[in-house]
Amino acid sequence: MKVHDNISLKSLFLLFFKIGGMTLGGGYAMMPVMHDEIVDIRGWISADEFVDILAIAQSFPGALAVNAAIYVGYRLRGKKGALASCLGVILPPFIIIILASAFLIRYRDTKMVQHFFAGVRPAVSALIAVAVMRLFSSVDKNLISISLAMISFIAVVFIKIHPALIIIMAAIFGVVFLTQRVVNIDNVDVVDADTGDIDTVGIDIIAIDTDDGSTTDNLVVKSGDKDENID
């Protein structure tokens, strides 16, 4: 794992402290803010990796935002980075809840507090919708991806299967059906461009399975003890 020494622990802590303190609505509402700060503004990780982080964070016990913060911190600065990110995202809500709990418990039935939550709920729903749209926009739009998304939605909403189980099943499907496959072909005539000589070799075609199983990613030509990659 590459450690980014140019990213200070203080920067990680302050960033996640801001994310934890400025976002209402829980982990899913934090995702678009976290994406903006980490992917778009600072470029610390890629959009694809951010989606992978969310999948991993959702698969394990614990709050989504905390798990994601720990993963990002560890990815960037190792164990110390994970600790800094975790403390940063946890402390703001911890402090705010302690300070606000006495007020909310005493005045939760007043019109002011009720109006406060009435205004917050639509905004939180919008943030969650933005997170869903951004996640979907970064996913490959092929038949398999769309089918998996629809099946997962039906399984969670209507069949009431736990989301963690859905992610595990989708991961197993990816490992079994969407991994690299190597096709060996022997006795292929290859013409030397310099001398015009014809040499009979074996080739390995390393292909990435897609929805139609036809995409070739790399071609490895083996002639004797020498391998040559043809992209």
Image (tube, grey):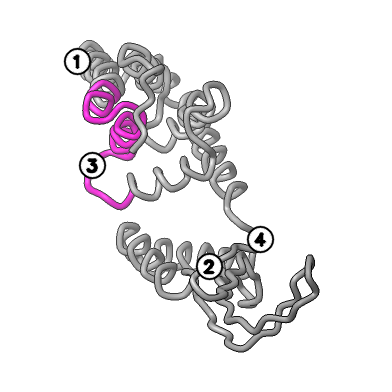
Is residue 145 rendered magenta in the image? no
Count residues near mark 3 (Cα–Cα under 10 Å), then give few for <14, some for 14-19, many for 20+: few
Mark 4 or 2: the one toward you: 2
| Residue pictured at 53% horizontal, 66% vertical | 150
Would you say the residues marked 4 and 3 are in contact, meaning their CB atoms lie under 8 Å apart? no
Q: Of marks 3 and 2, which one's residue comes earlier in the chain?
A: 3
| Residue pictured at 58% horizontal, 75% vertical | 205
SS at mark 4 in the image: loop
The residue labelled by disc 1 is 98
Amino acid on which the number 1 mark rests in the picture: Ile
Would you say the residues marked 4 and 1 are in contact, meaning their CB atoms lie under 8 Å apart? no
Amino acid on which the number 4 mark rests in the picture: Asp
SS at mark 2 in the image: strand
Query: Left or right of 217: which side holds 82?
Result: left
Q: Position of residue 13 (x, y in %)?
A: 31, 16
Mark 4 or 1: the one toward you: 4
Q: Position of residue 25 (x, y in %)?
A: 40, 30
The label number, if any, that marks residue 231 in the structure image: 4
Give me the C-alpha separation between circle 1 and circle 3: 20 Å
SS at mark 1 in the image: helix
